[in-house]
Amino acid sequence: MLIFESQSLDVHRNLAMEEYLMDRVQNCGPILYLWRSACAVVMGKNQNPWQECRLDLMAKESVPLARRISGGGTVYHDAGNLNYCIITGREEYVENAAYQLVFQTLEKFGIRAEKTGKSNLSVDGVKFSGNAFAFRKGRVMHHGTLLLKTDLERLNRYLGSMLKGIETHAIASEPAKVMNLGIERQLLAEALKKEFRKNYADGREFQWLEADFDAAVLQEIEARQFSDDWKFGATPAFTLERNGLLYRIRKGEVQNGEFAGKMFASVANSFVC
């Protein structure tokens, strides 16, 4: 098994390291990756950013947007989060075992949690963690946020639709009341590592440092993570009606009307009403 905790607060770099571990570190057994970022909004692979977050407000307040490689809904990150990621071979993956890792860890702090809905983790029905999954190349990534001392006011301001009337098959987030667990991040991180060693032990433990990443490969993944082609161009096709005209947007580009040929991200503010 391998345990790695990132020291970076850059959301795009951390997502790039997660993808690198998923695709390129395959001979070390189960992987636990822990990280956090500065204030950011992270959406699922198959989501529409204009439907999921208030990009205009985020731009004014210099809050970055990121798109991850897993499905699921849009989440808010800041340094009060702890994000956990478990990576295993597809044959070894057991969804409930990943949840149990969190539940058993939280019990050490006197917190009894449960799974609610499709993939949320909650205490007394109030969500503190959203989880998502990626399956590719015989590997599975199961990851989630853990709200510890997150700024919930900012979370609620940034999450929500910037534009009304979007019609799309993109996956929509399911709003839920959220809470902070109030646990010190490093205490929880160490407890998660200890529980991971107990639950996922395979007779060996590899040490991994940021210097162990192939810098050129990581930089390439990070550049794609940061690119508008990924954040906006990967948005599923959608339509939006304004002033009697139905605009069609595909691969992030407006297909008709006065903005035809332009990237929707560059003209989206014109559609705010």
Image (cartoon, helix red, strand yellow):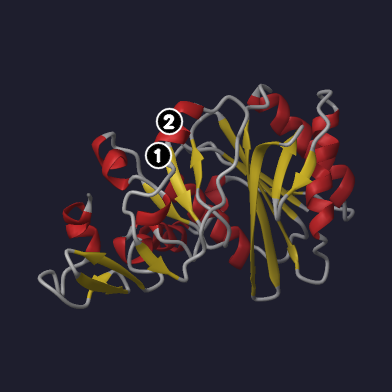
Q: Please tell me how crowded label 1 is: few (under 14), some (14-19), or many (20+) other residues with Cα within 10 Å.
A: many
Q: Is residue 176 left or right of residue 38?
A: right
The image quadrant of residue 72 is bottom right
- 63 or 54: nearer the viewer: 54
The image quadrant of residue 176 is top right
The amino acid on which the numbered mark 1 sits, given as a three-letter code, is Tyr
- Disc number for residue 74: none
Q: Please tell me how crowded label 2 is: few (under 14), some (14-19), or many (20+) other residues with Cα within 10 Å.
A: few
Q: Name the residue under label 2.
A: 154
Find residue 47 and report its horizontal and vertical position in percent. Answer: 46, 62
Instruction: Look at the picture and state if 34 lies above or below 80.
Output: below
- 4 or 136: nearer the viewer: 136
Q: In this view, does 46 lie to the left or right of 106?
A: left
Q: Residue at x 58, y 24 (%)?
A: 149
Q: Mark 1 points at which residue?
A: 158
| Number of numbered discs on residues | 2
- Element on which disc 1 rests: helix
- 63 or 237: nearer the viewer: 237
- 104 or 203: nearer the viewer: 104
Find residue 15 and report its horizontal and vertical position in percent. Answer: 50, 52
- Labels 2 & 1 near each other (Cβ < 8 A): yes
Find residue 263 and report its horizontal and vertical position in percent. Answer: 21, 66
Q: Which residue is drawn at 51% across and 30% down?
A: 79
Instruction: Look at the picture and state if 164 lies above or below 10.
Output: below
Whether residue 109 can be seen here? yes
In the image as oriented, which residue stretches furthest toward the front?
Answer: 244
Whether residue 235 can be seen here? no
